[in-house]
Amino acid sequence: MPERQIDRRDLLAYVPAFLVAPQALANAVAPQSVPAPAPAAGGVKPRPAGGKVQGEGVTIPFAMAGCWADDFGARDEIRLLAKLDSKIIVSCDKAPTNDDHSLAILVSAGAVVQSMLMLASASMASATMEHPRALDMAELIQVNISAGTVKKKPHPAAIASAVGIFARPDATTAFDPNWKPDAETLERIRASLIDTNITAVVIPEEAKAGLLKDLQFLASVSPELARSIGPSELWGEGSTVFLLGRGSNAGPQTALMAGRVMQKAILFSFQVAASLDARLLLPGPMEAAAATSPEHGMAAQRIAAMLLGVGFEPLAMLRMGRVLQPMARAIPPVLQMLTPSMDSIPVAK
């Protein structure tokens, strides 16, 4: 392989890989918990000795960042093919079993992509996305990374969010009851959760008890919903609650964007040493619980009404706070999700 000079921008892009590599290697010595990655389609094609590579790009660190996204129920089914021609192919290794599974896959893929884009923003790299015309689990999204092309110094907030990709604590534990975010932080988080066909509201403290009561009422007849929202004490003191909703004409792109905005908000919260814990409210369990009785139906209607928009339905509940006893997040199955590839590299003869 010919030697090539690595400039300062490329070195910056490699920094996350250096941070993650020891933990990824720890996965490699525990084969019982991390299956060996499948070879890339067609195998790895080595470059001819002395051949000159055109359009070579840095993609592995960005794909690694994607592996550290939050898990919305299907992250471990996402596959990332990191090519040396500056492309990362995001796919799923399973066909969805139902609409809820499909939604979880798309939201998880969106979160994975957002982590890659956030790292690009902090690494002076440009990043674009390409979507297939039709939903295809074999190629949900193609992310194009071009490291070292942005000539503007990254904003410190972008760097802080990029650090949060790897360093944020486990947000699923108890929050400090004495910590509350200021109004500016709350509005920034709420605004980051809004996009086309997606809305979000901060639940006022005086309305939180009623929302949680309705949710627990629905969860009492739905084990799936109960598992999703977790124990009620997690939503009490020290927890500021957001409700995320999607419009009635939402499609696959809306689900992908929902994953992106939730991951963005999660990383934004790290900038103020806070955590955001997002829980999906899948439509299947919600609708089944609402159909149990007229009272359950009214509870579901009251929750939807909090979104303050006609035709919006709940998609996720998020709790923001400061973790009382910070613990490291579980290491994701990087070696299962990520496959390096040397395919599609034009070689000068």
Image (cartoon, grey):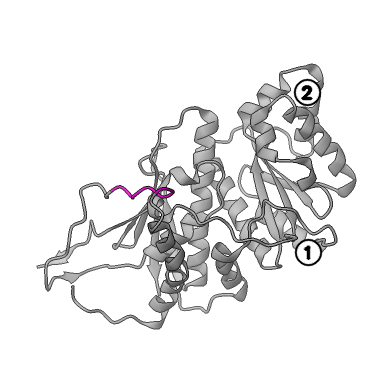
Looking at the image, which is closer to me, 210 or 246? 210
Q: Which residue is mark 1?
A: 184
Looking at the image, which is closer to me, 283 or 215? 215
Are there few (<14), some (14-19), or many (20+) residues within 10 Å of tag 1?
A: few
Would you identify the image quadrant in which residue 273 lies?
bottom right
Vertical placement of residue 256 versus 187, above or below = above
Say which residue appears at 67% left-offset and 51% top-offset: 172
Q: Secondary structure at mark 1?
A: helix
Q: Is residue 103 visible?
A: yes
Report how far apart the C-alphas of labels 2 and 1 lie in the structure: 35 Å
Say which residue appears at 80% left-offset and 17% top-offset: 294
Predominant SS along the magenta part: loop
The residue furthest top is 293
Q: Which residue is mark 2?
A: 296
Looking at the rendered structure, the kind of residue marked 1 is Glu
Looking at the rendered structure, the kind of residue marked 2 is His
Magenta region: 32-38
Q: Is residue 151 left or right of residue 164?
A: left
Q: Secondary structure at mark 2?
A: helix
Q: Is residue 253 visible?
A: no
> Could you tell me residue 289's position as x and y percent?
70, 24
